[in-house]
Image: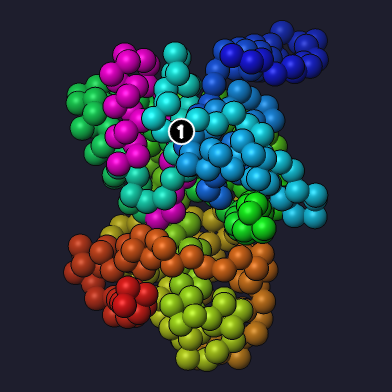
Amino acid sequence: MALRRLWVQVPSGPQDLTEVRPLILFMQEKKIVVIGVGGRTGTMFAFELGKVADVLGVGKEIEQIKKEKLFVKRKERAPLVFREQVITASQFPDKTAPEIIFLATKNPVGPALKHYYQKIKERRLPPPTLVLSQNGIAAIKDSLKTLKEVFGKDSDKVRVARLVLFNPIDRKEIKGSTDIIYSLPIRVAFGKISGPGNLQNITFLFKKSRFVTKEFLPEEIQDMEFSKLFLNLMGMASATRELSVSQGFQNPETLEEEIGVLKEYIRVVQASGGKFLNFPWCPVKFITFFIKVLPIKIFLPLRKYLSRLISEGREGKPKDLAEIKYYNGAVVNLGKKIGISTPINQKVLGRALK
């Protein structure tokens, strides 16, 4: 395994040595696998984490990467060739198991997760910590169910973490090459779902990669997911009308539908016993309070302001309808589970699935 050179200034106080020793061990002995390289999220994680750790990417765009046709373009910086080591799914794993697997494939997580962890079990390798980065609120349930299928009663020995990403990532094809486009700093919220120990290595990895982070307690993870899905739902009604977020929020009829989607979601989450949390960079709890209590007509005079605010937050990236089943579909399913009607979300979902 290739080692990356790292200069460490040893602190004078003995109390600080606990921070230096994990750093040295992590850089020398640990490997991270990012599954989904070639896609937007997988490429970003492999590139950013590869600056401080030994990263192996797994993906489908192997030939493009070998030909140096995959580029990372961080806003306001020149594009950089993606040069991390990559293998195909059939080549995983090598002789040693990684310490951490970042699963950056699209929903559903079950099939991909079963493929990789079944191979780990067959080779009798220690199961790596799993980090789930999918959108929506289904990833946790799907992952725990799949790990139970693979490991049986030993599934509780697999440490599982949930991560939600707040950076919009775009992908553009340009003359046979692909640009993965995002801005810095990388902002993530995360926390442990299950398994032994803590997430010290992950916390340390994010710190060295200069991510802006917020770690939540295990009992807060479901609410963290609810809060992130609230942000994901913004713009979906517009997208199903083939409108950009900016166009949709400036159109009175579409804006009413956008606000209606969010009002239904807030009602369903709170009726299910969930709640909304604030993130350091986005006061979701504060926003949901006002959307819940204010009538839709209050938002209509503000539509140009809301359009600009939400478009800037998404950095111009268009909404992707590919996973609408895990956005508005999740609202519909949760509503059915607790007996609450969600006609606006059903309407938006139906329009997309026509």
Where in the figure is residue 71, as x and y percent of width and height?
68, 46
Magenta range is 111-136
**Residue at which label 1 appears:** 88
Where in the figure is residue 98, as x and y percent of width and height?
47, 21
For residue 73: magenta? no
Say which quarter of the image contains residue 26: top right
Q: Residue at x 65, y 45 (%)?
A: 69
Where in the figure is residue 11, as x and y percent of width and height?
78, 13
Q: Residue at x 70, y 37 (%)?
A: 210
The answer to whether residue 208 is visible is: no
Where in the figure is residue 221, as x and y percent of width and height?
41, 45
Question: Mark 1: few, some, or many residues within 10 Å (few <14, many ≥20)?
Answer: some
Question: As shown in the figure, which amino acid type bears the numbered disc 1?
Answer: Thr
Residue 295's place in the image compared with 331, above or below, is: below
State the residue in front, 218 or 137: 137
Residue 160's place in the image compared with 309, above or below, is: above
Q: Could you tell me which quadrant the N terminus lies in? A: top right
State the residue in front, 154 or 46: 46
For residue 126: magenta? yes
Q: Is residue 304 left or right of residue 232?
A: right
Q: Is residue 186 left or right of residue 194?
A: right
Q: Residue at x 61, y 23 (%)?
A: 54
Residue 259's place in the image compared with 321, above or below, is: below
State the residue in front, 312 or 170: 170
Q: Residue at x 34, y 36 (%)?
A: 113
